[in-house]
Image (tube, grey):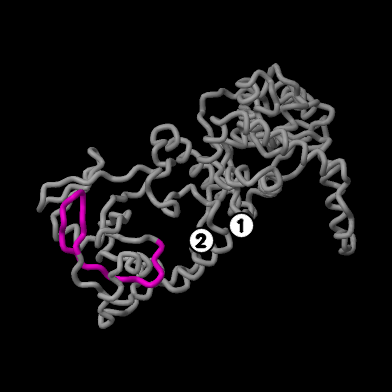
Amino acid sequence: MKLTITTLSDLIIHLDVSGDMELENFKALCSLETNIDATNMSIFFNGKPLQESNKTLSFYGVQDGDMLLVKDGRGNQTMNNANFLGQLPQMDFSSIQVPNHLVQNERREAENIFATLRSNPEQVATLRVNNPRLAEAFDGGIEEFAKTLRIQQEARAKEDQRRIRMLLADPFDSEAQRMIAEEIRRQQIDSNMETAMEYLPESFAEVAMLYINCKVNGFPIKAFVDSGAQSTIMSKACAERCNILRLIDNRWSGIARGVGTQRILGKIHLVQLELNGVFVPCSFTILEHQPMDMLLGLDMLRRYQCSIDLKANVLRIGTTGTETPFLSESEIPKFARLNVNEDIAQDDVQKAIQESLKESSPMSGVSAQTPSTSGHQSRSGSNSSTGSRHSEADIQELVSMGFKREQVIIELDAFNGDKNQAIAALFAKSIIVPDNLK
């Protein structure tokens, strides 16, 4: 009969054995495939350990097509201790401090990763795409980087514990079925993202918004071209700079609703807008608190038959036949760049988001999340869990950080066994774990 063997390090093996094979011989066979000592090996079937080595697989009810979990039996003592502690009265251990040498080791590990990233700009660029939160912490210095790294490692550990509970649970239990379905869904999402990263990497890049240079009343302005906006708008501060605030007609005041709300101070009915030396009349709706100076909306774009030519990277004005080039990313206003966070306090960003959600239409139960950590990278490596030329201690140290064994070996191969380089590459290619990880 054909059996599927899996381990906690995501190693999957298919074996063709006889149902009359004794458990002792089956352990020896699994030991050759998994590099786990047969004397310390534990085998689980349907969430229950198989203990009597002289019994056959058929005796335990193992049938063709079943899956068994093989793990290092040395971990059983930890599990038994956990079960024993669970039976004790609840005690407060908050006053117990972590040994200083463990904290120092974590700090030294974070410093090594930080130094490796600083010497490798290519890894930093990969980190900014795959793990923006850790990349932002990297920009903030070693203290913030070490703190964020520790938080992500703890989240990885929780995910591993959840996955172990799923593997050891009774497959017929409703909660186990839910966890298995969730794991399958996550694997499908991970596979979809890996495919996108290989065939559509542009979807993970940041896109610069469309801005043009123009003048209002002789004052230069960087205008945002937005064909999705119904009206052309201008901020109160910009109107004041252009000395046209006195022209606001307050009879057109009100509330602008979209993703959030803005107070409309009124409307300026006619102002000369200069685009690349050509003057065109334009009207503006004035908003009180608007971050961008000016937004060229659909009303004026349609009025002058404008077309957005992304191939030539210009805004073409149909009524005058003139072209205005779009600004490069370095020329657009700083707040409009998606990767700029140093001048914006995180608390202010979160406050603005919460206020916008409250004022907009109800969207209960919707929250912004990042894909769960699963170590997304190309599938260029084969399943080389056995016969590795690297130290097993180094491999296990990196696996304990939450990475898959196959990924660890691939990165160690790529950097000729340099553990620090491999750790930096693994973190750079990984996706952050959501804060609300179960």
Where does label 2 land, which residue?
Answer: 367
User: How far is mark 2 from mark 1, CA to CA?
Assistant: 10 Å
Estimate how packed mark 1 is, as few (under 14), some (14 to 19) or many (20 or more) residues with alpha carbons within 10 Å: few
Q: Are marks 2 and 1 in contact (CB under 8 Å)?
A: yes
Residue 116 seen: yes
**What's the amino acid at mark 1?**
Asn
Mark 2 or mark 1: which comes first in sequence? 2
418 inside magenta stretch: no
Give the percent coordinates (x, y) of residue 436: 61, 57
Q: Which residue is mark 1?
A: 436
Look at 32% across and 79% down and name the residue there. 254
Residue with the most extreme bottom position: 251
Crowding at mark 2 (Cα within 10 Å: few <14, some 14-19, many 20+): few
Q: Is residue 41 left or right of residue 390?
A: right
Q: Nearer the viewer, residue 384 or 56?
A: 384
- Indicate the quadrant containing the C terminus: top left, top right, bottom left or bottom right: bottom right
Instruction: Look at the image and give the residue range highlighted in magenta.
Output: 272-291
Pinpoint residue 140: horizontal percent, then vertical percent: 63, 46
Quadrant hosting residue 404: top right
Q: Is residue 58 visible?
A: no
Q: Secondary structure at mark 1?
A: loop
Q: What is the quadrant of the N terminus in the image?
A: top right
Identify the amino acid type marked 2: Ser
Task: Give percent across and percent down for residue 14.
Answer: 61, 27
Residue at x 84% of width, y 28% of height: 39
Picture coordinates of residue 437 (x, y %)? Answer: 62, 54
In the image, residue 289 lies in the stretch drawn in magenta: yes
Q: Residue at image x 57%, y 32%? A: 123
Name the residue nearer the viewer: 165 or 160.
160
- Up-down relation of residue 22 to residue 208 (above or below): above
Q: Name the one closer to the observer, 438 or 202.
A: 202
